[in-house]
Image: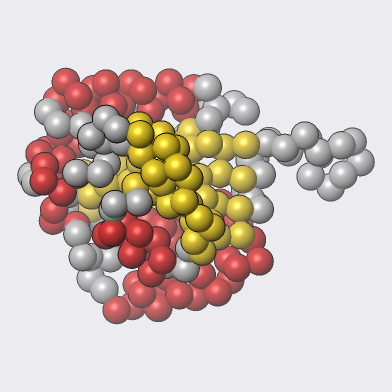
């Protein structure tokens, strides 16, 4: 899959294609309250933010991820980051309606984190609305997955709140932020569920603020 850059604009936030110009903003956003990121690999300081961006761009160039900086529309300040990743194209046979597609058939949304100022605002809801709308309506994916550390109750509640369906727990799934084998809770939204999830996200947007 070729590298892809996207910018997705909402009413309150903008998901800008991540690049080196966001390094200072990411470092400032993450540094405001490092205690928030017990379960997530979030860069601390400019040097870590630079490595974080370099890694994300390498994945983008390999065609396996589309990373974003999350920016407040009102003041242009970076308030976090997120990305599409684990983007898969299935080997549909010749003659199948999905054969030869450039877009992914399934993907994951992850590496999502926000500055303290964006917690309990509409930022996460709108980010998910923008990304899921693009995935299901532009790429026409069949499934979007989410994984989170089984210990991360706040993340689990946020995914369930938007309509993610819990599939189970993957044991020793990947390295945790505290460098132990992490058990991950797996959630998904499939194409047939998207209309209901979209309606739910729009209702949540009407109730929250940034």
Q: Is residue 74 left or right of residue 65?
A: left
Count the numbered circles shown.
0
Q: Is residue 108 above or below residue 208?
A: above
State the residue at coordinates (47%, 68%).
Answer: 163
Q: Is residue 70 above or below residue 119?
A: above
Q: Nearer the viewer, residue 190 or 177?
A: 177
Q: Nearer the viewer, residue 152 or 11?
A: 152
Which colouring convention does the figure follow? secondary structure
Q: Nearer the viewer, residue 132 or 38?
A: 38
Q: Is residue 36 left or right of residue 200?
A: left
Q: x and y percent of residue 52 in the render?
A: 28, 27
Q: Is residue 69 above or below residue 203?
A: above
Q: x and y percent of residue 40 in the render?
A: 27, 41
Q: Is residue 140 left or right of residue 41?
A: right
Residue furthest right as drawn: 95
State the residue at coordinates (33%, 64%).
Answer: 157
Q: Nearer the viewer, residue 44 or 169?
A: 169
State the residue at coordinates (46%, 25%).
Answer: 59
Q: x and y percent of residue 31 in the render?
A: 10, 39
Q: x and y percent of residue 30 in the render?
A: 15, 40
From this viewpoint, is residue 18 visible?
Answer: no
Determine which quarter of the picture holds residue 162: bottom left
Residue furthest left as drawn: 32
Query: Which quadrant is home to the C terminus?
Result: bottom left
Query: Which quadrant is home to the N terminus?
Result: top right
State the residue at coordinates (79%, 44%).
Answer: 98
From this viewpoint, is residue 117 visible?
Answer: yes
């Amino acid at each position: 899959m070729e590298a892809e850059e996207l910018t997705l604009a909402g009413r309150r936030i903008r998901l800008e294609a991540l690049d080196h110009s966001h390094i200072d903003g990411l470092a400032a956003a993450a540094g405001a309250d490092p205690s928030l990121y017990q379960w997530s690999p979030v860069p601390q300081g400019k040097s870590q933010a630079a490595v974080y961006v370099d890694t994300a761009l390498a994945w983008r160039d390999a065609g396996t991820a589309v990373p974003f900086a999350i920016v407040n529309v009102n003041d242009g300040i970076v308030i976090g980051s997120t990305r599409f990743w684990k983007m898969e194209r299935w080997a549909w046979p010749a003659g199948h309606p999905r054969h030869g597609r450039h877009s992914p058939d399934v993907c994951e949304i992850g590496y999502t984190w926000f500055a303290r100022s964006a917690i309990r605002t509409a930022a996460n809801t709108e980010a998910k609305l923008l990304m899921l709308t693009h995935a299901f309506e532009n790429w026409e994916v069949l499934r979007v997955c989410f994984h989170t550390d089984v210990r991360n109750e706040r993340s689990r509640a946020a995914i369930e709140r938007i309509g993610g369906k819990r599939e189970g727990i993957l044991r020793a799934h990947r390295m945790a932020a505290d460098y132990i084998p992490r058990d991950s809770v797996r959630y998904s939204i499939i194409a047939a569920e998207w209309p209901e999830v979209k309606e739910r996200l729009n209702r949540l947007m009407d109730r929250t603020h940034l």
